[in-house]
Every structure is written in C-alpha cells, then in structure tokens.
Image (spheres, rainbow, N blue to C red):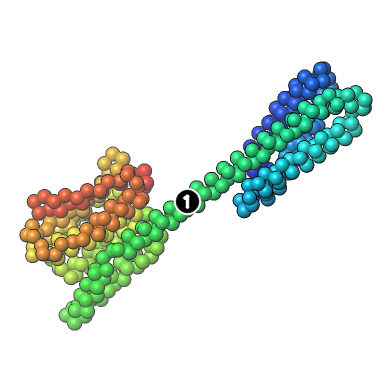
Amino acid sequence: MKHPILANRVRLIVWWLVWIFLALGQSLLFYYAFGSFNNICIIDSLISLLLYSGIALSLWYPFNFFNTGEIRTTTLISNLVLSGAISVGLWVVITKLVVQLVLPDGNNYQAYWDATFPYRIGTGVFIYGLIILSYFLFLSLSNLSEKNAKEARLESLVKETELKMLRSQINPHFLFNSLNSISSLTITDPEKARDMVVKLSEFMRYALARKDELPVSLQSELDNLRLYLDIEKVRFGDKLTIEEQIDPQCLDFKIPVMLLQPLIENAVKHGVYESTETVKIYTKAQIIDDYIEIIIRNNYDTEPSLKKGTGTGLLNVSRRLELFYGNKASFKTSKENGIYTVTLYIPREYS
C-alpha cells in the first residue's frame, strides 16, 4: 500500500503545517520548563520536530507491516510499543547531537536540555501516539474506500447480469414461428421467404450484436422494431397494420437496448394472434416537459381468451426501467374500449 502522506500532495502540505504547529507548541512548553525564551529554544524546537517528522514518515512502513490483521492484538500492541520506544529514543539522541553541532555554546544547551528532558520524553510519546492514531485512521479510511469500491463493482456486475438475463427473456417463440413461416413460404412464395430471411437476419444481428447494456438511440430501436413488424406482416398480411407518430426531436434520445421489443411482441401476441379483425399497432413518441413520452397502443379482441399471458414482457420492461433510471422513469398500462395502451415516461437528462 502506498504511503498515505507522500502519495498525496495536499496531505503532505497539511502534514508540514501540523508539524509547524507542533514546533510552536513544543517551544511554549519548553519555555515553561526552562524559564526563558531564546534562540536555543527556537533552534531546538525546529530541528527536533524536523527530525521527528522524518521519523514519523518512516514509521508508516513498520506500522503497515505489523497491522496486517493476521497477528494477535497483544502482539500488535507489543510491536507498536517497541517501535515507539525505539523511535522516541532515536529522536532524543539524534536531536541532541544535531543541535550541539549547530549551536556554538554547548554549555548553555546542556542546561536547557536537562531542564526540558522530561517534557521532551513526554512530548515524544504524545506525538508518537498521534502519529499511530493518524495512520490507523488513514488505514481505516483506505479499507472503507476499497470496500465501498468493491461493493459498487459487485452491484454493477449484479445489475449487468440481471439486465442481460432480462434481455434473454425476449420471446423465443417469435424466432420459431418465423422459421416455420419461412419454411411454408419456400413452397408457396419463395420470394417472400427470401425477403423474410433477410429481414430476420438483420433483426437477429441487431439483437445479438448488442452484448453490452449501453443505451442506443430511439431511432435505432424504431428501425429494429420495423424489421420485426415487417417479418410479422409477412406472416399476417393485411391483418396487421402499423402507424407511427414520432417527434423528430426524440430520435436521438437514448434508451436501453431492445426496451420496447417486449411491448411490441405483446401487441402482436395478444392483439394480432387472438383477433379475427385487423389490428393496428400505433407507436408515438413526444417530448413533454423534462420527459420523453413513448406510447404503444393496439386494439384487441374483447372476448375472453382461454390463453392467459404470464406478464413476463411487462415485468421485463418495468424492471429494466427501474435498473436504468431508478424511480425517475414511470410505466403504466390501460385497457379501454378494446384498446390496450402502454405509456412510458423517461427523463430527458439521460439522453
């Protein structure tokens, strides 16, 4: 792990400012102990705290080595006490040697040293405690940050996995039915069969090429839906009609890939499949305030059907909206006078 002070310029600046403050505090303390304030007091404080700051920086490495989480608490405390005794001892000895080399009058300094020695030891122990507590704080914050980052990555992975699972639920019966229709058309109308194969391949290429969950433009989604509906139109002929009312300003708006596919599939399945009359699938997109409103509407046979849907398509869309937009997007359905309507409101801020 990198040194928490040396690896960050702001922390390094704050570090030196704190040591300047400590030097000032030590000067006042030693003034109280010695009884007078002179050059010796200033020089001693600056040199001693400068040396201690270097020792304090180096203490990170044994501290990080001891605090692995794999040793017992008593052993850790023993190691910290031992490193503290060594650090304070080195600091006291080196400070005296360096100051004596700097000051011309060694006798006066010896008197100053003797008067301040007990306070010097106490100051060293106190500062050592602050250093160790600071390193514990840095290590705890680093571990917390790393834990949060791992949880965020895990949450993102779970979300991506769920989105891919939801996409995989797109009705496979469409593919089987299309292949069966192509098989029949190869005998009755080979030209239509060829056209259906081309459109089916383009549709599957779009569906399979989007392996990630990056949003795509509404234009791309509509183009793909038209391919799907063209394929179904080959099967159902004039029984299926299509109408669109798309505001051009909405075409560049980004939405989750294949978000609308299950809704169109539902319209075909519960509208065209089960009705004896012509079914129109109407798609509308417009901007309303800070939202894009997308409406998919179709007529259906009001006679009760023996075959009930599972609701997977609607749950799929609702869940994907929640995963992408949280509670900022909304989704509702309604049935009235033989018309089934699905309405989506998606915030424009995501476009």
The residue located at (29%, 43%) in the rendering is 291
Question: Residue 110, percent across and down?
Answer: 89, 27
| Residue 307 falls in image quadrant | bottom left
For the residue pair 254 and 263, the one nearer the viewer reads as 263
Q: Is residue 122 left or right of residue 250?
A: right
For the residue pair 334 and 205, the one nearer the viewer reads as 334
Number of numbered labels in the structure image: 1
- Indicate the secondary structure of the residue bearing disc 1: helix
| Residue 59 falls in image quadrant | top right
The image shows residue 102, relative to residue 248, as above or below, that is above
Question: Residue 231, percent across and down?
Answer: 23, 68
The image shows residue 94, relative to residue 108, as above or below, that is below
| Residue 12 falls in image quadrant | top right
Q: Is residue 254 visible?
A: no
Q: Residues within 10 Å of mark 1 (few under 14, many from 20)?
A: few
The image shows residue 141, relative to residue 169, as above or below, that is above
The residue located at (31%, 40%) in the rendering is 290
Extreme residue in the left direction: 303
Disc 1 residue type (three-letter): Glu
For the residue pair 174 and 131, the one nearer the viewer reads as 131
Question: Residue 215, percent across and down?
Answer: 37, 54
Question: Residue 203, percent across and down?
Answer: 30, 66
Q: Is residue 76 left or right of residue 228?
A: right
Q: Is residue 72 left or right of residue 268?
A: right
* Residue corresponding to mark 1: 151
For the residue pair 169 and 253, the one nearer the viewer reads as 169
Q: Is residue 151 visible?
A: yes
The residue located at (25%, 48%) in the rendering is 331
The residue located at (9%, 54%) in the rendering is 338
